[in-house]
């Protein structure tokens, strides 16, 4: 990796850290420059604007983590009750990228920035659609394999599952505690079993 690529990657990682803790609007270019110890010229060499940097954070930092943690575990799944539960539990407890005190980075940016910057909304919506599609397809495969009862609307279930996950992340962030995750998972397990 070239020195220029290392500098860019370092800026993106530091920018993500600041945005994840403080939010996009509260994170300034000057703050990113100060934490990465690069010049303003170097920042603008790699990113033409704060908005371009924000999009790079979404597409190059957040998307791969969402893909690895949320989408990939459901690819080709024909045991959705087991696999969806395991995926949600893993994201809540076992992935260090997702911190209890700062919630879900995707959900955070959707709430903060979707109404304000159209290109952010498009990118964030695309990522959300991939999550919903992974859940929906997992449930459809499960139905074909006889693991999900007929009559279930897989798309509705996917929306319900994703919104429940985002909701409990927000509660955990507000309470700065994983305690609510345990209660959520108990009820979530019952819900998933009701789909069988």
Image (cartoon, rainbow, N blue to C red):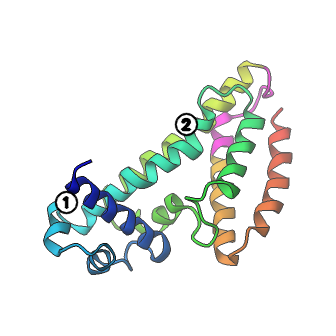
Q: Is residue 54 above or below residue 134?
A: below
113 magenta-colored: no
Tell me: 58 left or right of 159.
Answer: left
Q: Where is residue 53 in the image (x, y as percent from the top left)?
A: 28, 62
Residue drawn 31% across the image and 74% down it: 32
Task: For the C terminus, give its image quadrant.
Answer: top right
Q: Name which of mark 2 and mark 1 comes first in the sequence.
A: 1
Q: Give the range drawn in magenta.
A: 146-158
Q: Nearer the viewer, residue 130 or 103?
A: 103
Which residue lies under the disc numbered 1? Answer: 46
- How far apart marks 2 and 1 lie (CA) works out to 33 Å
Q: Where is residue 176 in the image (x, y as percent from the top left)?
A: 68, 76
Q: Where is residue 144 in the image (x, y as percent from the top left)?
A: 71, 19
Disc 2 residue crowd, few under 14, some 14–19, many 20+, Cα 10 Å: some
Residue drawn 62% across the image and 59% down it: 166
Tell me: 65 left or right of 79.
Answer: left
Evaluate whether residue 160 shows in this view.
no
Disc 1 residue crowd, few under 14, some 14–19, many 20+, Cα 10 Å: some
157 magenta-colored: yes
Which residue lies under the disc numbered 2? Answer: 133
Q: What element carries label 2?
A: helix
Tell me: 75 left or right of 191.
Answer: left
Evaluate whether residue 172 shows in this view.
yes
Residue drawn 62% across the image and 54% down it: 95
Tell me: 114 left or right of 48.
Answer: right
Q: What element carries label 1?
A: helix
Tell me where residue 180 sits by quadrant. bottom right
The mark tally for this picture is: 2
Q: In this view, does 167 lie above or below 161?
A: below
Q: Position of residue 28 (x, y in %)?
A: 31, 78
Report the predominant secondary structure element of the magenta stretch.
loop
């Amino acid at each position: 990796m070239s020195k220029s690529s290392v500098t860019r990657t370092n800026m993106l990682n530091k920018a993500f850290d600041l945005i994840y803790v403080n939010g996009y609007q509260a994170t300034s270019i000057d703050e990113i420059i100060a934490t990465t110890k690069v010049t303003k010229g170097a920042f603008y060499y790699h990113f033409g604007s704060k908005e371009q940097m924000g999009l790079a954070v979404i597409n190059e930092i957040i998307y791969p983590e969402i893909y690895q943690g949320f989408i990939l575990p459901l690819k080709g799944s024909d045991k959705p009750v087991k696999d969806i539960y395991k995926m949600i539990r893993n994201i809540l407890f076992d992935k260090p990228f997702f911190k209890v005190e700062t919630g879900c980075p995707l959900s955070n940016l959707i709430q903060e920035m979707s109404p304000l910057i159209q290109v952010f909304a498009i990118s964030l919506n695309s990522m959300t659609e991939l999550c919903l599609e992974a859940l929906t397809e997992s449930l459809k495969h499960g139905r074909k394999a006889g693991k999900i009862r007929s009559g279930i609307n897989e798309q509705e279930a996917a929306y319900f599952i994703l919104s429940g996950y985002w909701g409990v992340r927000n509660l955990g962030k507000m309470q700065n505690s994983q305690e609510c995750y345990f209660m959520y998972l108990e009820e979530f397990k019952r819900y998933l079993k009701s789909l069988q």
